Image (cartoon, helix red, strand yellow):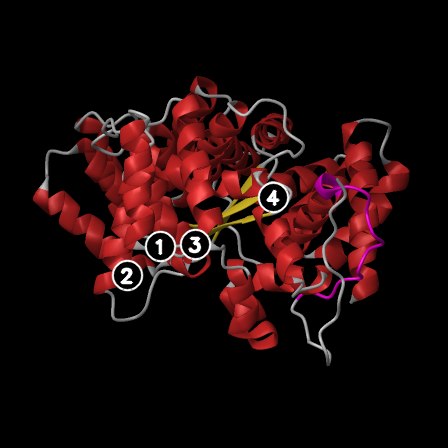
Amino acid sequence: MTRRFPRRLLAGSVALAFAWQVPCVLATTDETERDLGRRFAFEAGAQIPLVRDPEVVAYLRRIGERIVAGLGPQPFDYEFFVVRDPKVNAFAVPGGFVYVHSGLLTRVDSDDELAGVLGHEIAHVHAHHLARQQEATQWLNYAQLLGALASVVQPALGAAAMGASATAQLQYKREFEQEADYMGARYMHQAGFAPRGMLDFFHKLWQEQRLASSGAPPYLLTHPLSEERLTRLEAVLRTSQWSGATTPTPSRELRRVRLLARLRGAPAQDVLNAYQSQVKAQPQDAEARYELGVVLLESGSYDAARETFEQARALGAPGVDRDLGRTLLRLRQKEEARELLARAAESDPSDALAQLEYGRVLEEMGDSEAALAAYRRAVAAYPDLEDAQRQLGILEGRRGQRGFGFYHLGKAQVLRGEYPAALSQFEKAESELPAGPEQADVKELLPQLREYAGRR
Ligand code: ZN
């Protein structure tokens, strides 16, 4: 069946946050949705502040991909992003692009709770809810839909142009919410998560909505919650025998994700107070001590961070080498930093941040060959690490590898959303790169960057 996004224009022109050329009509729903999602994700890269910390993104992806894996072959490649915003929100853009706000991550108490949110969002995508709803209401054309999606994911962006009414068009109707609850719970169960996590998290939001004077969390504007919906979800869990309890305490990984998500969304001083109180309340808790060290490091209090990391290590906290090494590098204690970072980089080659920081200390000590290798490992482990792409670009350029130099500098600019600058780097890289994955990447990105430049 062919389904199309309605193309009827509203009377009068609406200034959009996203300026799109409405594409020609595409043949299938999947194709239309994929195109919409890709365009959205590309534009969002320039306009929506994203959290790129490898640990945060890896955690979200791991849970999301585990759910998707249970669905079998899919028409879309699902991609997961973290928006830097302290509010509780999440939204799926058709075509498999799922956005979770850092504020939501700070409120999650178990993997199951996050899996609940992701299962629900993936269900909306899987069932084409937004496309079906748009088809029924005929309210937004393709370009307007993109603008409205932008205003949902980042209200400051589109609010002035689109108004609250456009956002309201993206509020899922009641039967779609119930369907996403049911399907999402089933996906969770298939992937080995406790579906109860979805209900627990929605209960938490429901309580908050009733108590909050400042209005409901943004998540509830697009995914309206009612007592009836919660009751139905509870009944689904009961009849499917999915009522089993979730993991009671957050894993160490989730605790670290919550900490970084908090740091990206709130002033460091507010976060510092909370983690200092936590250490005061539990002075023997190694993990609490380690977390305080991270907050101190992130807020630039390097002496205090070093002391705290050393205490955490003495209490038995695992994985302190890397962050103590990062701290010592900033305190200019290079020899000690190199030793710790070498150990961290060797013990976990997939730890992109350890590779990056190891590369930094090697570069500062004059070993640019070894630094280059470390930056390459960082980029291989996590291509979205902007600093690693930039440092790699600088070193490649310095050793005369101009094509690779332009390419990696361009990648860093893409990650910063600086598309015009990236375009000029990629145009230079194109003619100098040998055939290989980098050249293929340039060939894929250039048309998008040129189209973007043409619209500005
Ligand atoms: Zn929903």
Q: Is mark 1 within 8 Å of ligand 1?
A: no
The quarter of the picture where the N terminus appears is top right
The answer to if 26 sits in the magenta stretch is yes
The quarter of the picture where the C terminus appears is bottom right
Q: Cα distance, mark 1 to mark 2? A: 9 Å
Q: Which residue is mark 3?
A: 223
Image position of 183 (left or right of 1): left
Question: Total of numbered circles in the picture?
Answer: 4
Q: Cα distance, mark 4 to mark 3? A: 15 Å
Q: Which residues are magenta?
A: 18-31
Q: Which residue is mark 1?
A: 225
Give the structural element (helix, strand or loop) at label 2: helix
Q: Residue at x 71, y 51 (%)?
A: 39
Callout 1 touching callout 2 (CB < 8 Å): yes
Q: Which residue is mark 2?
A: 209
Q: Is mark 3 within 8 Å of ligand 1?
A: yes
Q: Residue at x 46, y 41 (%)?
A: 179
Q: Which mark is residue 179?
A: none
